[in-house]
């Protein structure tokens, strides 16, 4: 009997991208479960060309009942899949509301709008839609998906058990409190609000600094952030790392005293579980999927009162007992996001769908 087939499709495959990381992890699990499984993408980073196949080469096999589709933006890929004789196991990573980009990038705004429209049409081609958070699952239900579940992003512990990067450590001597945020430079993540927050916190602690880890995904926005830091007299106190390796990123987590987020839209927020795992207290604006990811851990605030949040940071820096309690609860919470726990959820999903059982060709009315 031939092996069952279950491939994955994503719009893009990029080094260090959370969606790409999840796709590689799922591929490994599927292969270990006895599936034939490859990843196909529309846009492929040059370093991944040997690992990810172009979507133009994807052809469903006769015994292929289902394909996994990672949806996060509008693209021709979704339309292509809806025209093929397979049904979808949809993994929804959320689509950033287009208004965040309307005044900056009209083309990206259009892709976000299209992505939301495609999500509605994907309903009738999908046997199960998995949100990576409860927040995402609620969106799926609101759109009209009948069968939904939650499949969170998983953290592979081995990737975080790395030695500190000597260059990062030597360039960042401990001189004062260090605030950290990890995420590409895009308007919904509101890095400008973090810079403003640092301005107010430095009134309390003049030696404080901010490290912004993440690629310059929108160069014009990144330049504006640097100009803002300069205008506020903090050009030397805000570190823009740009793209970093896994080892470098873990090193920045180790250097930091507090993870702070002012983001106004996160479907999940993988840096939150990274902070939990690495023992870094979290202070975050309670927007979108952030409360779902944090659960009853970290500290959430619902108003961007910079002076009040700066005072809260100062308390977190000095109250050692409070920090210990926060970190302990976070490390309890992160257990549900570690690979063994998420893999159990994934295997249950596969079992419930009966995908491993051989069947005849798929039709668009149901899995046969």
Image (spheres, rainbow, N blue to C red):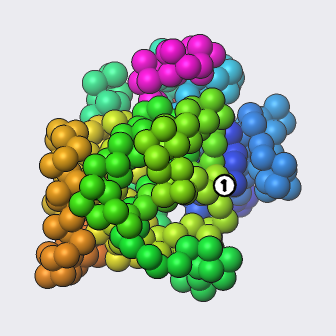
Counting the numbered discs, the total is 1
Residue at the spot 67% in from the left edge and 65% down from the top edge: 245
| Quadrant of the image containing the N terminus | bottom right
Please state the horizontal and vertical placement of residue 261, each as a whole percent of the image: 35, 50
Q: Quadrant of residue 335?
A: bottom left
Residue 127 at least partly seen? no
Viewer-side residue, 283 vs 270: 283
Whether 314 is drawn above or below 122: the answer is below
Please state the horizontal and vertical placement of residue 152, each as a whole percent of the image: 40, 54
Q: Magenta span covers which residues?
A: 93-112
Whether 274 is drawn above or below 304: the answer is below
Please state the horizontal and vertical placement of residue 348, each as a whole percent of the image: 39, 60
Disc 1 crowd rating (10 Å Cα; few below 14, some 14-19, many 20+) is: some
Viewer-side residue, 201 vs 74: 201
State left or right for residue 114 relative to residue 198. Answer: right
Residue at the spot 32% in from the left edge and 57% down from the top edge: 202
| Quadrant of the image containing the C terminus | top right
Residue pointed to by mark 1: 243
State left or right for residue 317 relative to residue 347. Answer: left
State left or right for residue 15 relative to residue 269. Answer: right
Whether 171 is drawn above or below 264: the answer is below
């Amino acid at each position: 009997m031939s092996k069952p087939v279950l491939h994955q499709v994503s719009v893009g495959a990029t080094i260090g991208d959370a969606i790409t990381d999840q796709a590689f992890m799922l591929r490994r699990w599927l292969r270990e479960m006895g599936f034939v499984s490859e990843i196909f993408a529309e846009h492929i980073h040059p370093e991944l060309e040997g690992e990810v196949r172009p979507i133009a080469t994807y052809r469903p096999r006769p015994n292929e009942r289902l394909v996994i589709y990672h949806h996060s933006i509008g693209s021709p890929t979704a339309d292509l899949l809806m025209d093929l004789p397979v049904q979808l196991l949809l993994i929804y990573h959320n689509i950033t509301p287009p208004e965040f980009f309307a005044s900056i990038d009209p083309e990206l705004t259009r892709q976000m709008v299209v992505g939301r429209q495609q999500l509605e049409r994907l309903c009738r081609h999908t046997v199960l839609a998995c949100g990576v958070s409860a927040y995402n699952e609620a969106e799926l239900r609101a759109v009209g998906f009948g069968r939904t579940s939650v499949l969170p992003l998983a953290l592979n512990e081995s990737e975080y058990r790395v030695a500190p990067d000597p260059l990062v450590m030597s360039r960042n001597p401990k001189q004062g409190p260090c605030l950290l945020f990890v995420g590409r430079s895009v308007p919904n993540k509101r890095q400008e609000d973090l810079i403003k927050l640092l301005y107010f916190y430095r009134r309390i602690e003049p030696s404080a600094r901010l490290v912004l880890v993440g690629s310059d995904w929108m160069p014009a926005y990144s330049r504006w952030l640097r100009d803002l830091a300069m205008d506020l007299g903090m050009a030397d106190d805000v570190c823009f790392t740009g793209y970093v390796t896994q080892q470098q990123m873990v090193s920045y987590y180790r250097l930091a005293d507090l993870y702070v987020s002012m983001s106004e839209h996160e479907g999940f927020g993988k840096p939150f579980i990274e902070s939990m795992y690495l023992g870094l207290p979290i202070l975050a604006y309670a927007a979108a999927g952030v409360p779902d990811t944090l659960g009853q851990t970290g500290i959430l605030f619902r108003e961007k009162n910079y002076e009040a949040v700066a005072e809260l940071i100062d308390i977190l820096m000095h109250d050692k007992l409070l920090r210990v309690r926060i970190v302990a609860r976070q490390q309890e919470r992160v257990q549900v996001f570690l690979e063994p726990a998420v893999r159990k959820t994934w295997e249950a999903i596969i079992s419930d769908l009966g995908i491993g059982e051989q069947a005849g060709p798929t039709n668009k009315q149901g899995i046969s």
